[in-house]
Image (cartoon, rainbow, N blue to C red):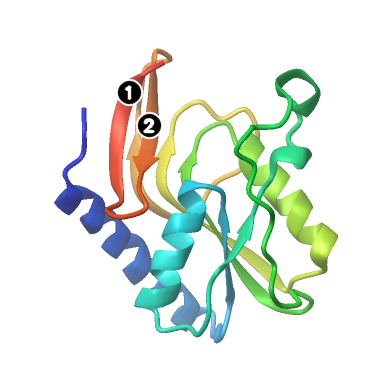
């Protein structure tokens, strides 16, 4: 099943609105937006532009932080981490496309702390699906989905961004 471009845009708009509310409520200004490769980096860049922040969003390649690295090895299309500013004492908006088991988020947080000590980390995901293995929940979610073990959800992009539910 493919989400239409419009359905995906609605989810993106939902997380943007929720993030604006979160930042206002928590009196956070000038956060650093960091996306997890690949889909999270696309969404982070989209948020960076939509929210009017200068420059490019930061991006993480969590390949070397994965707990299955010794079994799976390195993805042949590894992109480097791009952390253009210091994160010490900053509010971080960590963005990913799908929160599934929580392992990617754990790896991303580990890498963030290798760069410094932020004041806070807010997790934003386009989709949170069933199947958590770690006690990690997103602060801002576009949509929650219940999918069978035979299904995956994938974000295609970067232009346009479109979600798709596929068979494993």
Element under disc 1: strand
**Can residue 49 be seen?**
yes
Q: Is residue 96 visible?
A: no
Query: To which quarter of the image does residue 91 belong?
Result: bottom right
Residue 10 located left or right of residue 115: left
Task: Give the residue number, with chain letter if any, for mark 2.
Answer: 153
Residue at image coords 30%, 51%: 161
The percent coordinates of residue 166 (x first, y second) are 32, 23
Locate residue 153 relative to residue 83 in the image: left or right.
left
Most foreground residue, 76 or 44: 76
Give the residue drawn at x 29%, y 34%: 164
Q: Name the residue: 81% across, 64% down.
A: 115
Q: Earlier in the sequence, mark 1 or mark 2?
A: 2
Q: Position of residue 41 (x, y in %)?
A: 51, 56
At x 21% / y 27%, what residue is drawn?
1
Query: For the C terminus, which image quadrant?
Result: top left
Q: Secondary structure at mark 2?
A: strand
Circles 1 and 2: CB distance less than 8 Å?
A: yes
Asked if residue 47 is positioned above or below residue 104 in the image, the reply reads: below
Instruction: Measure the C-alpha gap from mark 1 to mark 2.
Output: 6 Å
- Indicate the position of residue 45 as horizontal and vertical percent values: 45, 66
Q: Residues within 10 Å of mark 1 (few under 14, many from 20)?
A: few
**What residue would you read off at disc 1?**
166
Q: Residue 63, position in %: x, y? A: 70, 39
Along the horizontal axis of the image, is 4 left or right of 60? left
Q: Is residue 8 above or below residue 92?
A: above
Q: Which mark is residue 24?
A: none
Give the residue furthest to the front.
76
Q: Is residue 83 above or below residue 158?
A: below
Q: Quadrant of residue 12?
A: bottom left
* Mark 2 surroundings: few (<14), some (14-19) or many (≥20) residues within 10 A: many
């Amino acid at each position: 099943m493919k989400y239409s471009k419009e359905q995906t845009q609605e989810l993106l708009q939902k997380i943007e609105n929720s993030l604006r509310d979160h930042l206002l409520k928590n009196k956070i200004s000038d956060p650093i937006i960091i996306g997890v490769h690949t889909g999270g980096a696309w969404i982070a860049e989209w948020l960076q532009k939509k929210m009017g922040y200068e420059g490019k969003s930061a991006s993480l390649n969590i390949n070397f932080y994965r707990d299955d690295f010794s079994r799976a090895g390195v993805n042949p299309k590894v992109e480097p981490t791009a952390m253009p500013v210091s994160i010490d004492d900053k509010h971080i908006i960590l963005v990913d496309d799908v929160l599934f088991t929580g392992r990617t988020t754990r790896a991303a947080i580990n890498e963030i702390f290798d760069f410094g000590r932020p004041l806070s980390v807010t997790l934003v995901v386009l989709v949170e699906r069933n199947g958590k293995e770690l006690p990690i929940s997103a602060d801002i979610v576009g949509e929650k989905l219940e999918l069978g073990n035979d299904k995956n959800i994938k974000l295609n992009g970067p232009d346009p961004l479109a979600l798709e539910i596929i068979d494993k």
